[in-house]
Amino acid sequence: MKVVSDFNSSVPSNFSDSLNISIPSSSTVILGEFELSVDKEGSNVVLKGTAGIQSFLGLPNVIINVLRNGNIIGSVDVSTLAVNELRLATFNIIDINAPIGYHTYTLTAQRLNALLTQANVIGPLTFTGTTVSPAL
């Protein structure tokens, strides 16, 4: 049996067309961040997110990374097929056997193709995490 031992979230917006966060190509932009406690060995952290991304110039390729304490533990590629296209990227990433301690989970985005492309996060933007521990 498993039990939920911690939950946290970063929800800048639940609505489409509610944000205007430019996604850079030379660096990453932080989209969300929170801390979670892992208090037992064998615990997993279930991370879920949604990011509404719109292309404004060219056909940008965006990588969304999930980090634990600054180290990438998962990523999602988002590509658009037309200018002004809205892509709703959703993901589930499991941090299996997360180490015991208090961890910072961060959601970032970066454009992979810099030449003549532009993309923005326009919403919705949600990022949640749940620590699931073994019952003892």
Image: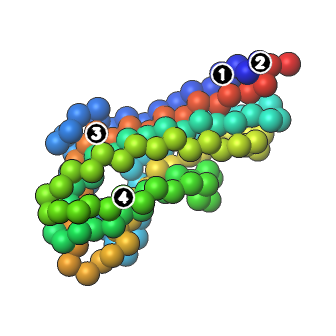
Disc 2 residue type? Answer: Met
- Is residue 8 depicted above or below 67 in this figure? above
Above or below, 111 against 29 in this view is: below
The residue at which mark 4 appears reads as 78
Cα distance in 3D space between marks 3 and 1:
26 Å
* Residue 84 visible: yes
Residue 60 is drawn in which quadrant? Answer: bottom left
Q: Residues within 10 Å of mark 4 (few under 14, many from 20)?
A: some
Furthest residue toward bottom: 115
Q: Horizontally, is 98 left or right of 27 in the view?
A: right
Q: Earlier in the sequence, mark 3 or mark 1?
A: 1
- Disc 1 and disc 2 in contact, CB within 8 angstroms: no
Q: Secondary structure at mark 3?
A: strand
Gap between marks 2 and 4 measured at Cα: 36 Å
Determine the residue positioned at 78% across, 25% down.
134
Residue 50 versus residue 36: which sits nearer the camera? Answer: 50
Task: Locate the N terminus by quadrant.
Answer: top right
Who comes first in sequence, dot 3 or dot 4?
4
User: Residue 4, which numbered label?
Assistant: 1
Q: Amino acid at mark 3?
A: Pro
Among the two numbered marks 2 and 3 on one chain, the one whose residue lies closer to the N terminus: 2
Q: Which residue is mark 2?
A: 1
Residue 89 screen position, x and y as percent: 36, 47
Foreground disc of the pair 1, 2? 2
For the point 42% across and 60% down, which residue is it? 77
Discs 3, 1 touching: Cβ within 8 Å: no
Task: State the separation of the CA atoms marked 1 and 2.
Answer: 10 Å
